[in-house]
Amino acid sequence: MSASSIPKRIIQTGKSAQLPLRERAMVNSLRALHPDYEYLFFDDTQVEQFIDDVFPQYRPVFDGFPYRIQKYDFFRYLAVFHYGGFYFDLDVLLAERLDSLHDDACVFPFEGLTMSRYLRGQGMDWQIGNYAFGAAAGHSLLQTIIENCVRAQREPDWVKPMMNGVPPLSRAEFTVLNSSGPGLISRTLMENKSSLPGVKVLFQDDVCDVTTWNRFGTLGVHMMDGSWRGKTSFIRRRITQRWEVWEMERLMRESRKLGPTRWL
């Protein structure tokens, strides 16, 4: 395996190594499929130690994120950039081994069609996910993602184009998505795709088929626990859900006109 290939390493993180039954089952399934892979798990204390030991220059950035999930978005990019390997959220369930992806330098999943007016205005009606991805150590896409996480924190105006059209009730959630999550990494890919080598997106056969969204190619599925989302009132949650459904139905009609397939 060359230095530009993804090594046999799996990285995960959680508050504690004492996981709930559902998460423990998924982790054990992942590890059982890959007994020959190095497995690295970081609890909260180990994440903090990793930042201090490996990336002390980013300690102010890590501490500066207002939401916990942003800190751990940032950590996952740093960890894979440093070690190389695959990162998986604790709610990802794999059905097959990862061997088919090791010749690639960087792999991200197609997550679904995007509601971002900014991305769509740039000709990208889809987005990638950060619940699972793999890369060789030091890959340039991860480097650029890390730099953009820093930029998003230090230059709030840089995030504003991605917030265009977001309803007030969803602003906090979309701020997270667009400053450290899928919105940010999708924007990074879109704005740098011509200069980033060896990036593969695991597209589904029909990107407009919602039943195939949130899958790690044909190898696994993201169970979408959504534990990072803040607790809101029933009425507020229902209003937000209705808006998202209405908006996606409108955007789906536009995307279907482009056909079922996408590419970088």
Image (cartoon, rainbow, N blue to C red):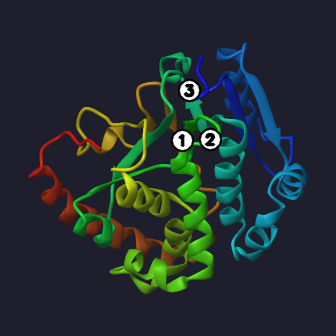
Q: Quadrant of residue 73?
A: bottom right
Are dots 1 and 3 in contact, CB under 8 Å?
no
The foreground one among 250 and 146 is 146
Mark 2–mark 3 Cα distance, whole angstroms, equals: 25 Å
Q: Residue at x 81, y 67 (%)?
A: 59
The mark lying in front, picked from 1 and 3, is 3
Identify the element where label 2 is drawn: loop
Could you tell whether 118 is left or right of 208 in the image? right
The mark lying in front, picked from 2 and 3, is 3
- Dot 2 or dot 3: first in sequence order is 3
Are dots 1 and 2 in contact, CB under 8 Å?
yes
Q: Quadrant of residue 168?
A: bottom left
Q: In the rendered structure, which amino acid carries the disc numbered 3?
A: Ser
The foreground one among 251 and 54 is 54
Picture layout, residue 195 above or below residue 65 = above
Q: Residue at x 67, y 59 (%)?
A: 74
Q: Which residue is mark 3?
A: 5
**Local crowd size for mark 1, using a 10 Å CA cut-off: few (<14), some (14–19), many (≥20):** few
Identify the element where label 1 is drawn: loop
Q: In the rendered structure, which amino acid carries the disc numbered 2?
A: Asp
Q: Position of residue 199 (x, y in %)?
A: 43, 39
Q: Which residue is mark 1?
A: 223
Could you tell whether 114 is left or right of 73 in the image? left
Q: Which residue is mark 2?
A: 91
